Amino acid sequence: MNTTSANADTTSTTQTQSKQTESQDGNTKSTTVTKTVKKSNAGTSVDTTKDSTYNQAYNATKKLYQTRYHFYKQLNNVGKVASAKGDYGKSFKLTRIAKTNKDTYVKTARGWISSNAFNQYVKEQGSMNEKMKVTNASTAVYSAPAATKNAQKLGTASSLGLTDQWLNVNYRKYTNTKEGYFRVTKDGQNYYINGRDMEFNLSGLNSHNAKIEKAIKVGEALVGKSPYSWGGGRTAASIAARRFDCSSFIHYIYAKAGVNLGSVTATTYTLAKEGRAVNYKNMKRGDIFFFNDKKEGAFCHVGIYLGRGLFLNDSPSTDTHGVGISSLSDPHWARRFNHVVRRVV
């Protein structure tokens, strides 16, 4: 379809074309391409590209994470319908996708909204210094945390030559969905790898105390196998199911080693009174130590120290979202450590 309008200086012709293409999965996509061509009365083209758009069928369901955006009746933020302020984490069915010179938009039942609204985002980040190894050769490697804006898949750990070696980890990013990514640098190139597919170097760590080593062995056996459960680990059923929170996990592993840390209903507050106080600069393997958080308050978390800045803990913020190994060089933990340490063995 062509439409033409004119004034004293220019003639503007809008050309609309519809075409169908077959995607790799065999589905047919309908695409509408709109291009405005402006010509002066002398016949000289003024601009033929910057107003170009595509508008095609799309079929996806995504969660909305960035609530600063709005829904609109039309593309290019025309005809505001509603704010996405109350829609964090809600799923939307997307039926069309369009790119204009202003932004890329997707269509929902509530109207058009920027596709950026569905990107995850980095919530916390900072420098760190660790040596780590990839545990899954097929894990995806990205230019930035996956599903965040402009993140690109660069390959796999295997295809990029990042396996079977200790890698220098110099940065850490957490997304709003509690996914943690380590940045590794090799041959001047930065790569982001999900923390669930990496491990710390634990070699040579030993307290030479049988009870401490037994407790740590029990805890390490649960890494990646025990999802965090707030309030868990205080009944026979939840213990049998290996469902703990941070304090019940510490109580459990030390109980298995024959160390009594009070009632099975132990909390971070009761654990903070067990044993004797130790200066955080003198922390040793087997000591338990605590964290504060602005939202969750004082003594909101506890871990057991392994050595070389590493610790074992149970938290939704670990890379396993449960029992896992973390580092005090990780900015997430470093800024929350309250320097309270107790030696219980």
Image: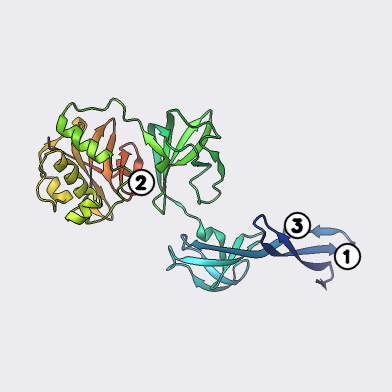
In the rendered image, which residue does mark 1 sit on? 41
Residue 91 in the image, given as x and y percentages of width and height: 47, 65
Pick the front one: 65 or 307: 307
Quarter of image, res 202: top left
Three-letter residue code for mark 3? Thr
Q: Element at badge 3?
A: loop
Residue at 47% from the left image edge and 60% from the top image edge: 66
In the rendered image, which residue does mark 2 sit on? 320
Three-letter residue code for mark 1? Asn
Answer few, some or many: residues within 10 Å of disc 2's Cα (few below 14, many 20 plus, some between 14 and 19): many
Circle 2 or circle 1, nearest the eye: 2
Q: Element at badge 2?
A: loop
Pick the front one: 45 or 98: 98
Residue at 78% from the left image edge and 59% from the top image edge: 48
In this view, 247 is above or below 191: below
**First in sequence: mark 1 vs mark 3:** 1
Q: CA distance from mark 2 to mark 3?
A: 48 Å
Inspect this view and state whether residue 298 appears.
no
